[in-house]
Amino acid sequence: QVQLVESGGGLVQPGGSLRLSCAASGRTFSSYAMGWFRQAPGKEREFVAAINWTGGTTKYAYSVTGRFTISRDNAVNTVYLQMNRLKPEDTAVYYCAAQIIQPRYDLLAEYKYHYWGQGTQVTVSS
């Protein structure tokens, strides 16, 4: 079992930046690929970004490519999402998720993630 706790959400103006953090406890953090997903009001949850166990592979949704950066620090069991040039359409609850090492892992597939955080609200508005 692993527990995930997100932080860093809040209200920011368009064009601004936020950095989300997700602290993990429980089993060895380096055994997990980590992902960020988001859910806007009235919409389904969608993939945002993901990173593999070593940090050597990252994936991004097209809508955030070039603006968001995912990273991890296995020494402190934390994954980050740096969000720059935020837009109103980035407004959503952002969720951190963990995927156990498995033969057919898929960083983009929501159903492949085993553990989820409670989410943190990000609101982009003037």
Image (cartoon, grey):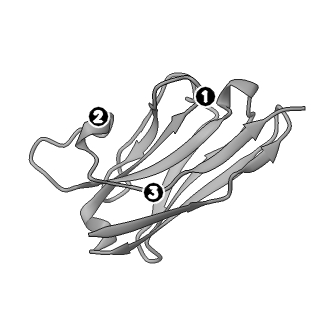
Residue appearing at x 9%, y 47% in the figure: 103
Residue 71 in the image: x percent, y percent?
50, 54
Residue appearing at x 76%, y 45% in the figure: 17
Residue appearing at x 26%, y 52% in the figure: 114
Q: Earlier in the sequence, mark 2 or mark 3?
A: 2
- Secondary structure, mark 2, is loop
> Quadrant location of the N terminus?
bottom left
Give the Cα distance between marks 3 and 1: 18 Å
- Secondary structure, mark 3, is loop
Give the Cα distance between marks 1 and 2: 21 Å
Specify the farthest residue to the front. 42
Residue 46 in the image: x percent, y percent?
45, 30
- Please name the residue that numbered disc 3 is placed on: 117
- Please name the residue that numbered disc 1 is placed on: 41
Residue 52 in the image: x percent, y percent?
32, 51
Front position in the image: 72 or 34: 34
Q: Earlier in the sequence, mark 1 or mark 2?
A: 1
- Please name the residue that numbered disc 2 is placed on: 109
